[in-house]
């Protein structure tokens, strides 16, 4: 028996949605029909691909191997079919890139904009998320690549440092008597604590949560607290004062994607463009 394309698509969609119900709705087939496709896949492989839990699905070891194969196989199919249109000499398609808010708007979109203007058939789908959720998006096939500020050492993943960010301590230049509160994205944001640890300073202040990096900047500007912030976002802003600290604090910007035996041209083109930061 062969691993037919429709079975691989059913597997990827089920993994992406994390639910047979949602995947069957997206594929516009009955849940029973979807279950039969997955059962056929498992029969061909003689292995279980999903661990079925009451409210979620996770991949078995066989499922993780199938995930890499399925992505590569479907990418090759798309590229083969694209050879039969009039734009065969140009990369085309959609690439899903997920990252964190301090770099997506200010660094990544400007970096890829020339490529996208030059070739309108390249569509990069940008999305920003909390740092702690990005690895899961990659594992669940909800992104083709992710951007992190650390090396995750994920099994079966390629990790490339494309740039780095310097973090600085800032406060409002306008408001006085600023409360001893440090503004972060949310409870899982560890940027402030990491900064203080690196400076060998004990962090004893209160925290405030502003949702994303631009909420933090607004909060600091309004005198609601201080923040540890990416320097490139505030360098030319007179609204903020950069406080002196003992050492420069740099963190990498790491591009991460699953290793495959075959990468489609759009993947290669986007990755190459992201590696050209000065």
Image: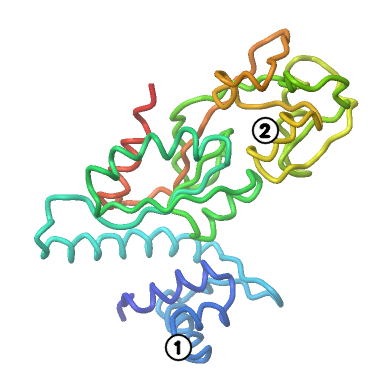
Q: Residue at x 38, y 34 (%)?
A: 111
Q: Looking at the figure, which quarter contains the C terminus?
A: top left
Q: Residue at x 50, y 66 (%)?
A: 63
Asked if residue 107 is positioned above or below residue 17 in the image, the reply reads above
- The tag on residue 276 is none
Determine the secondary structure under disc 2. helix
- Please indicate whether residue 23 sits to the left or right of residue 278 in the image: right
* Residue 103 screen position, x and y as percent: 52, 35
**Mark nearer the N terminus (1 vs 2):** 1
Determine the secondary structure under disc 1. loop
- Please indicate whether residue 144 sits to the left or right of residue 114 in the image: right
Residue, far front: 174
- The tag on residue 217 is 2
Front residue of 114 and 39: 114
Asked if residue 126 is positioned above or below residue 74 in the image, the reply reads above
Q: Looking at the figure, which quarter contains the N terminus?
A: bottom left
Residue underneath mark 1: 29
- Please indicate whether residue 104 sits to the left or right of residue 129 in the image: left
* Residue 214 screen position, x and y as percent: 63, 38
- In three-dimensional space, the C-alpha distance between marks 1 and 2, rounded to whole angstroms, equals 46 Å
Tell me if label 1 and label 2 are in contact, CB under 8 Å.
Answer: no
């Amino acid at each position: 028996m062969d691993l037919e394309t429709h079975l691989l698509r059913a597997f990827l969609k089920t993994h992406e949605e994390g639910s047979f119900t949602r995947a069957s709705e997206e594929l516009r087939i009955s849940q029973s029909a979807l279950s039969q496709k997955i059962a056929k896949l498992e029969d061909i492989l003689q292995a279980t691909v999903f661990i079925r839990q009451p409210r979620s699905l996770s991949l078995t070891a066989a499922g993780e191997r199938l995930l890499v194969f399925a992505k590569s196989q479907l990418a090759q199919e798309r590229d083969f079919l694209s050879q039969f249109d009039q734009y065969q000499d140009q990369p085309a398609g959609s690439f899903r890139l997920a990252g964190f808010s301090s770099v997506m708007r200010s660094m990544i979109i400007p970096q890829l904009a020339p490529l996208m203007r030059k070739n309108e058939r390249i569509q990069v789908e940008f999305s920003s998320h909390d740092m702690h959720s990005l690895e899961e998006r990659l594992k669940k096939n909800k992104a083709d690549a992710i951007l992190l500020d650390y090396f995750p050492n994920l099994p079966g993943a390629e990790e490339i440092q494309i740039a780095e960010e310097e973090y600085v301590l800032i406060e409002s230049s306008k408001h006085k008597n600023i409360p001893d509160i440090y503004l972060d994205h949310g409870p899982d944001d560890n940027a402030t604590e990491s900064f203080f640890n690196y400076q060998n300073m004990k962090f004893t202040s209160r925290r405030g949560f502003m949702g994303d990096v631009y909420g933090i900047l607004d909060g600091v500007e309004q005198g609601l607290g201080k923040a540890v912030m990416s320097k490139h976002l505030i360098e030319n802003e007179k609204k903020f004062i950069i406080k002196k600290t003992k050492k420069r604090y740099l963190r990498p910007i790491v591009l991460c994607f699953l290793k495959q035996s075959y990468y489609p041209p759009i993947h290669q083109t986007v990755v190459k463009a992201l590696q050209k930061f000065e």
